[in-house]
Amino acid sequence: MTETIHLTAAQAMVKWLSVQMTETGERYIDGMWAIFGHGNVAGIGEALHAYQDVFPTWRGQNEQSMAHTAIAYAKTMKRTRAMAVTSSIGPGSTNVVTAAALAHVNRLPLLIIAGDVFANRRPEPVLQQVEDFDDGTISANDCFKPVSRYFDRITRPEQIMYALPRALRTMTDPANCGPATLAFCQDVQAEAYDFPAAFFEPRVWRIRRPAPDAGELTRVADAIKGAKKPVIIAGGGVIYSQAEAALAAFAEKHNIPVSETQAGKSALPTSHPMAFGASGVDGSAASNAEAETADVVIGIGTRFQDFTTGSRTLFSEDAKLISINIHGYDANKHGAEALVADAKIALKLLTMELGDYRADACNPDARVDWLRAVDNYCMRPDDQTIKPTDGQVIGAVQRATDDRAIAMCAAGTMPGALKLLWQPSLGGYHMEYGYSCMGYEVAGALGIKLAAPERDVICFVGDGSYMMANSEIATAVMRRIPFTIVLTDNHGYGCINRLQTMGCGGEPFNNMYVDCNVEVQPEIDYVMHAASMGAHAVKASGTDQLEVELKAARTRNIPTVIVIDTIAKDFPGTGLETTAGEHGYFWDVAVPQVSTREKQKKRFEEYLGQIMKQSLVN
């Protein structure tokens, strides 16, 4: 007779999750973030309490931000481990939808256990239930379907024996990796079932490394052999494949310069001689010059997003595009010659195929000139009483940190500025730019520190993004998880203001506080606000004091928030000419065809000239 264990569906789920292991002997799901409501407290809440000694539970402050923490953890762990989140029905669930979209776009694993309505339907409509007048099977959790890689609704206890393995199979699949959502009916959570004891045997989840098709490998190798001036665009897939050393060896042996995307930055440290900096809209002069003249462009683990390609204007029409990617969907974008494979395996096999091939000499002087320009732009301002630029703030942070530092951000001016100006060590950069989600920063910094406690985590966040979501500071204080927040205050949405007024020819409106239709300009005391949640908070009068406070922050076991006023001005990341001297590229943000203002009319004519340069190959 088959041995069984009598448990509720929720208890069985937590017990099963506690024995899903990695090849290194750790739990693959490293605990669950939870905010309880009526849709998950009795079932999932009781189960988490029962197994708290073997499967940890952490309380967040907001469903979206605790999911961001879980995503940042998985990203820092290079997708080898993940976390789960649980929410109640209604607003608890829909709060997580934004985070699910973020994980989906960035190809990152996240397990979402969302409370749902009653499967038996007896008490309907229950509190917070979203009713569809024409479809009785719909609930708020159906919002997860377009932003989940795997979705299932648990309406019977025994269904978890099939749904849970499918969810983790998706999360550990390097090609289909993304969020998995289980909408768990609240009555079913509490229902008992005799589960086979074998279901709870420990299981090891291995992440495969698919080798390329032989024909694809030959075609790609032949294309590279015929190239005189190839360039590599390194994306996040390099890091997730743990192919950093393979990339460095490949670039060195074959003399191919490496440009980087937001997700791929720090796959090579800036100090590496083949690291030419950022690509595209917010790209370096050295990197974009190589890309402009390249006859073959080799994308590795990148989606060739609009910022990377200058909205399809960066590469020559005659350049051949090669895309090495784990997923055929991404590998075939922009009409590229696809090599569907794990990045690390592909680089190893390609270098064997290429033999002694070496590209023509790239321009190392351009790289040196660019780094010199970065240093000049980020240097300490002589007058400490004048508000610094974001670049000068970045320079101060760079001077005050060492190779242990990880700079992180997500939205606003800083992503473009950091991609352009931050000079990371290996793995010293973490940017959420697939979704560029305001509010990711503070929660994300918490997740990074949980995954990499030995490193110094520096969270760059603007006042606008800080106002979106900051409450996980309190969580970090409660758990004594230290990281440093550099809060740059330019009194509004400075990045979008620049896009509005310079990028699109508009007038300043509704972005900076001064341009809003309000009677009183807000003067927010961010120091007092952060301190009220238990953080060590201080305002830096200039970049000199910022450096002092950054060094002091490393001595604490709680988050440090350093506020500094900055000037809102044109800066890298807008696609416009700047005093940094970078060669940024066009970013396609549609400009109105009709306007009564001459400025807008002129900008539209310039826009037409830019879109004529775009490649139309899909």
Image: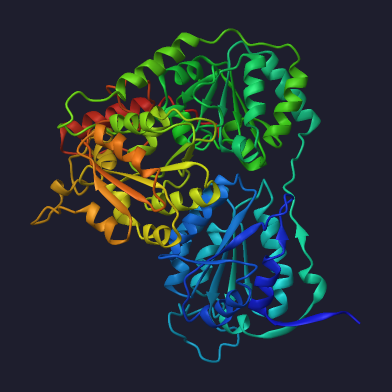
Front in this rendered view, residue 186 or 149: 186
Residue positioned 47% across, 27% down in the render: 279
Front in this rendered view, residue 28 or 184: 28
Residue positioned 40% across, 65% down in the render: 61
Q: How many marks?
A: 0
Q: How is the image coloured?
A: rainbow
Q: Can you see residue 332?
A: no
Q: Is residue 520 left or right of residue 187?
A: left
Residue positioned 16% across, 38% down in the render: 596
Toward which corner of the image does residue 63 lie, by quadrant? Answer: bottom left
Q: Is residue 156 left or right of residue 4?
A: left
Residue at the extreme bottom of the image, as rendered: 122
Front in this rendered view, residue 199 or 475: 475
User: In which quadrant is the N terminus drawn?
Assistant: bottom right
Q: Is residue 18 left or right of residue 428?
A: right
Residue at the extreme left of the image, as rendered: 519
Give residue 271's position: percent from left, percent from top. 50, 21
Give residue 421's position: percent from left, percent from top. 39, 28
Give residue 295's position: percent from left, percent from top. 58, 16
Front in this rendered view, residue 455 or 524: 455
Residue positioned 42% across, 63% down in the render: 478
User: In which quadrant is the C terminus drawn?
Assistant: top right
> Relative to 155, does residue 57 appear above or below in the rendering?
above
Q: Is residue 549 left or right of residue 148?
A: left
> Relative to 443, does residue 320 appear above or below in the rendering?
above
Residue at the extreme front of the image, as rendered: 555
Q: Can you see residue 337?
A: yes
> Relative to 237, does residue 138 appear above or below in the rendering?
below
